[in-house]
Every structure is written in structure tokens, then in C-alpha cells.
Image (cartoon, grey):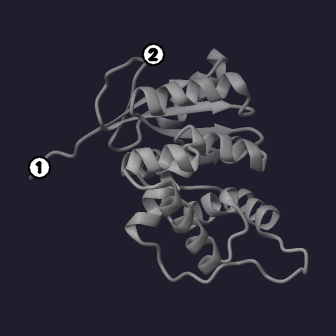
Amino acid sequence: MMATKMITVTLHADDPIARAGLSGLLRGQPEIEVLERPVQGVGRRSVAVILADRVDDDAAVMLRRLVRGESREAVLVAGKLHERELLSAVACGVRTFVWRHQATAESLAKAVRSAARGDSEVPSDLLNRLLVQLGRHGSGASSVPMVTGLSDREVQVLRFVADGLENRQIAGKLSYSERTVKNILHGLMTRMQLRNRAHAVAFALREGYL
């Protein structure tokens, strides 16, 4: 029988006591190996677990360095997270979130495994608030889009939107014209009843495209 490949976890928290608490929750979990100190170059099955009360500028820099700079998957354990902070974290490349007050050995291990697979996981209450705020129409009508699926082109464009790129930059990345990118986004938002770019990112997160 082939041995199970371990998931290496590095812990990132300003408070050493908080970091020790995360370590205690994750140690002993099947398939998970916790490193004592944050290190670079620990392999593709490495997940960074970051504890941050808020996603301020310093936290965003760290998230961007870990996820974008080091190509790591990440789990963000957050104390408080407003909708704008969620979008900031998503723009940094984070796709898996756990509320600090809900963090248990089981929930953290589940989040780490999800991140290692490249899946996304967002607390339902936070995602629901995001969708309500960004998708509410002035008429009060329901803004929940009907799911009919996204094309590969639409998913590619949305991933770059989540990274914070403008249409011109997305066009350069995909070798499209800027008009093509605009048309893709307009068609997607019209079909899915999405109000703006932030709402489109939230929808893609909820449906598992990001």
C-alpha cells in the first residue's frame, strides 16, 4: 500500500502563545506535520496557517508574500473580518478561512486538507453578508444568481479580477484585447445577475471556481 503523503504546515502569528495554541490543535492530526518555525521551500504540499485578528496592511503584505511570492496554499484564521478585508485576503490569494472563535483541532485540520487540495472554504455567515451587501439591488429584489456554469475563459478572467488586476492587465496576461475582457465580464455579470467585480469574485468563491 502506498504511504500517505504528509501535508507540511507552517504557523504564522505575531503572538508566540497564539502560535503555540495553533500548534497544539494541529499536532497529532493524521497526514499533518507541523514545523516548529516558519521556513521557505518546504514543498508543494505545504500549507501556511496564518493567525490575524484583522487583515490590515501588514497582514496583507505577509499574505501576499506567502501565497503569491512563495506559491503556498494558506489558511487564514481571523478574529474579525469585514467584507472589504475578505476581498483583500482573496486578492492576496487566500481561499480558505476559519473564524478564530470556531477554530478546533477538527476544523483546522479540515481547512488545512482543503487548502492542500487547492479548494476554497469561507465561513457561510461571512460569505452571506458579503453577497447581501454587494449584490443587493435598490428595488429589494433577490440578487442571488441562477447557476448555469462558467466557461473556462470566464474563470480565467475572474481569477485575475480576484488578484486585483485591471482589464488592461488581464488582457495582457491572456493575450486578449481589452474589449474582449470587457465583453467576457459584461456577459458573465449580466447572465449571473452580478452587480460589480467584487460581487463576481464573491459569487465565484461561493460556487467553488476560485
Residue type of the residue flagged with mark 2: Arg
Q: Would you call the spot at circle 1 few (<14 residues within 10 Å), some (14-19), or many (20 or more)?
A: few
Circle on res. 108: none
Q: Is residue 40 left or right of residue 181?
A: left
Q: CA distance from mark 1 to mark 2?
A: 29 Å
Instruction: State the image coordinates of residue 70 (x, y, percent, origin top left).
Output: 40, 27
| Mark closer to the chain start, 1 or 2 | 1
Q: Which residue is mark 2?
A: 37
Q: Residue at x 51, y 43 (%)?
A: 169
Instruction: State the image coordinates of residue 187 (x, y, percent, origin top left).
Output: 56, 74
Q: Residue at x 59, y 39 (%)?
A: 76
Residue type of the residue flagged with mark 1: Met
Q: Would you call the spot at circle 2 few (<14 residues within 10 Å), some (14-19), or many (20 or more)?
A: few
As helix, strand or loop, the secondary structure at mark 1 comes to loop
Query: Is residue 98 among what the camera can see?
Result: yes
Q: Is residue 110 above or below residue 89?
A: below
Q: Residue at x 51, y 59 (%)?
A: 181
Residue lying furthest left: 1
Q: Which residue is mark 1?
A: 2
* Residue mark closest to the camera, 1 vs 2: 2
Q: Quadrant of residue 186?
A: bottom right
